[in-house]
C-alpha cells in the first residue's frame, strides 16, 4: 500500500472502464465538472460498476499466491523489493 505505482494502477483500474464505457477520450475530459458528471453517471449504471469491480479485482489480486492474501514473504517487506 506504500507503493505509489500500486495507487496509480488502482486509479487507472477505476477510471479506464468508466471512460471507455462512455466512449470518452482524454481530450474530452478537460474539466472537473465533466469528470464528476461521468463518475456520477457510472455510479448509476450496474454494468459499469461490474466492469470497475472486475478491473479493480485484476489489479489488487496477486495471481502468484494462493487465495487473496499476500505471501508470507511479501508481508515482511517495509518497501517494495528491488
Image (spheres, helix red, strand yellow):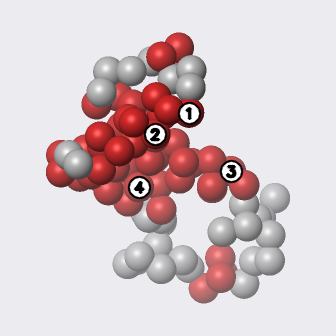
Q: Residue visible at 62% across and 47% down?
A: 8
Q: Secondary structure at mark 4?
A: helix
Q: Which residue is mark 2?
A: 36
79 versus 33 height, above or below: below
In the rendered view of the protein, which quadrant contains the C terminus? Answer: bottom right
Q: Residues within 10 Å of mark 4 (few under 14, many from 20)?
A: some
53 versus 40 height, above or below: below
Q: Earlier in the sequence, mark 1 or mark 3?
A: 3
Q: Nearer the viewer, mark 1 or mark 4?
A: 1
Mark 2 in CB contact with mark 1 (< 8 angstroms): yes
Q: Earlier in the sequence, mark 4 or mark 3?
A: 3
Q: Residue visible at 46% across and 39% down?
A: 36
In the rendered view of the protein, which quadrant contains the N terminus? Answer: bottom right
Q: Which residue is mark 1?
A: 32
Residue 50 is situated, as x and y percent measured from the top left of the image, at: 23, 52
Residue 63 is situated, as x and y percent measured from the top left of the image, at: 43, 63
Q: Residue visible at 51% across and 42% down?
A: 12
From mark 1 to mark 3, how far is it between C-alphas?
A: 23 Å
Residue 32 is situated, as x and y percent measured from the top left of the image, at: 56, 33
Q: Residues within 10 Å of mark 3 (few under 14, many from 20)?
A: few
Q: Residue furthest front?
A: 33
Q: Which residue is mark 4?
A: 56
Direction from residue 38 to residue 9 in the image, left or right: right
Q: Nearest the camera: 31 or 5?
A: 31
Residue 51 at least partly seen: no
> Which of the numbered marks, if any, corresponds to residue 5?
3
Amino acid at each position: 500500500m506504500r507503493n505509489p505505482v500500486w495507487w496509480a494502477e488502482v486509479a487507472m483500474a477505476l477510471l479506464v472502464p468508466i471512460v471507455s464505457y462512455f466512449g470518452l477520450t482524454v481530450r474530452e475530459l478537460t474539466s472537473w465538472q465533466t469528470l464528476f458528471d461521468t463518475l456520477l453517471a457510472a455510479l448509476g449504471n450496474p454494468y459499469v460498476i461490474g466492469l470497475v469491480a472486475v478491473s479493480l479485482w485484476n489489479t489488487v489480486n496477486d495471481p502468484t499466491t494462493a487465495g487473496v492474501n499476500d505471501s508470507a514473504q511479501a508481508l515482511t517487506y517495509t518497501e517494495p523489493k528491488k
